[in-house]
Image: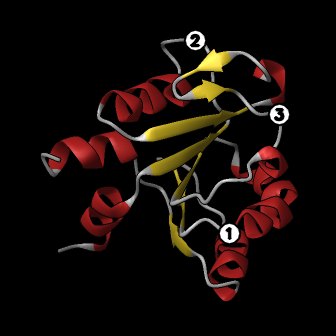
Amino acid sequence: MTQVERILTSSRTVVVLGARDKRHKAGFYVGEYLFERGYHVIGVNPRLAGRSLWSGPVRATLDEIAEPVDLLDVFRRPEDLPGHLDAMIALRPKVVWFQLGIRHDAVAGALEAAGIEVVQDRCTLADHQMLGL
């Protein structure tokens, strides 16, 4: 079993950092795809806070999530990631997944040093489909 397959089959609670409410944006349709396949999906975006999306209300920040998180799926620009680092570490997800086109080696290194697995520059939706999960 590959790393990606293990992550996607063992993760049940997914947080989408950078959730969107526009269907044509990846921050929406990837979360929607995962939700439709049985994942518990929590959106995070201060502009959408309180609105219902996927498994419940969108949270303004990662700090508002009290439940255990398996996978933090990140839809933020690489230059924005250092500003989320402390909250990502405090959340203690098993995995932080930087979506396709998103890489930040320094942030990834800090997360790994905190014991959090990191995947960079991959799409959860595409990998899920490719693996036939």
**Quadrant location, the N terminus:** bottom left
**Residue 67, quarter of picture:** bottom right
- In the rendered image, residue 112, in percent from the top left (x then y), is placed at 62, 82
Q: Which residue is mark 2?
A: 22
Which residue lies under the disc numbered 3?
Answer: 60
Determine whether, in the image, residue 79 is placed left or right of residue 115.
right
Q: Residue furthest left?
A: 132
For the point 59% across and 60% down, the residue is 103
Q: Residue furthest front?
A: 67
Q: Residues within 10 Å of mark 1 (few under 14, many from 20)?
A: some
Q: Closer to the observer: label 1 or label 2? A: 1
Identify residue for label 1.
92
Tally the marks.
Answer: 3
Q: Are marks 2 and 3 in contact (CB under 8 Å)?
A: no
Which sits earlier in the primary sequence, circle 1 or circle 2? Answer: 2
As measured in the structure, the alpha-carbon distance from the residue carrying label 2 to the one carrying label 3 is 17 Å
In percent of width and height, residue 101 lies at 52, 48
- 56 sits left or right of 39 in the view: right
Position of residue 88 relative to residue 25, above or below, is below
Q: Residue at x 76, y 19 (%)?
A: 48
Q: Which scheme is used to colour this image of the protein?
A: secondary structure
Residue 11 occupies quadrant: bottom left
